[in-house]
Image: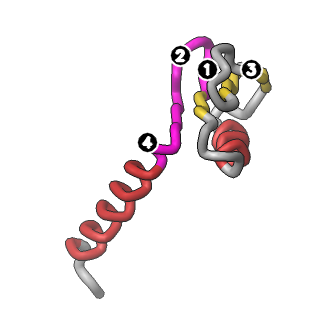
Amino acid sequence: MYELRYRYGASSEPAIEHADLNDDGQAAVRAVRELLGMPSRHAVEVRREGVLIFCRTRTRLVQETTDSVSSAKSRNRREPTQ
């Protein structure tokens, strides 16, 4: 059982949705991506059996996106061409 939490603005209590999802969590990721399309003041976290497995805020989203683009560029430079 996954628990999807998100906060709207300065709300102190997160809205919580529970969903039975497949074991690889693809549906959880899709749900989070849908929420990330909402305004940037939303904080999003996904928990499975109470353990946090995914958390995203606007600042972390920007940093993680920048890091992953940088990582991809360096991987592309290091991989040999055939």
Magenta span includes 57: yes
Q: Residues within 10 Å of mark 3 (few under 14, many from 20)?
A: few
Residue 56 vertical placement versus 72 (above, below)? above
Q: Secondary structure at mark 1?
A: strand
Could you say where residue 57 lies in the image, as x and y percent from the top left?
52, 38
Mark 3 → mark 4, Cα distance in angstroms: 21 Å
Range shown magenta: 46-61
Q: Which mark is residue 48?
A: 1
- Label 4 amino acid? Arg
Q: Are marks 1 and 2 in contact (CB under 8 Å)?
A: yes
Instruction: Classify mark 2: residues with Cα within 10 Å, few (<14), some (14-19) or many (20+).
Output: few
Tag 4 residue: 60
Question: Residue flagged by tag 3: what amino acid is it?
Answer: Ile
Q: Which residue is mark 2?
A: 51
Can you tell which mark lies on residue 16?
3
Q: Secondary structure at mark 2?
A: strand
Question: Is residue 67 among the parts visible in the rendering?
Answer: yes
Label 1 CA crowd tier, 10 Å (few <14, some 14–19, many 20+): some
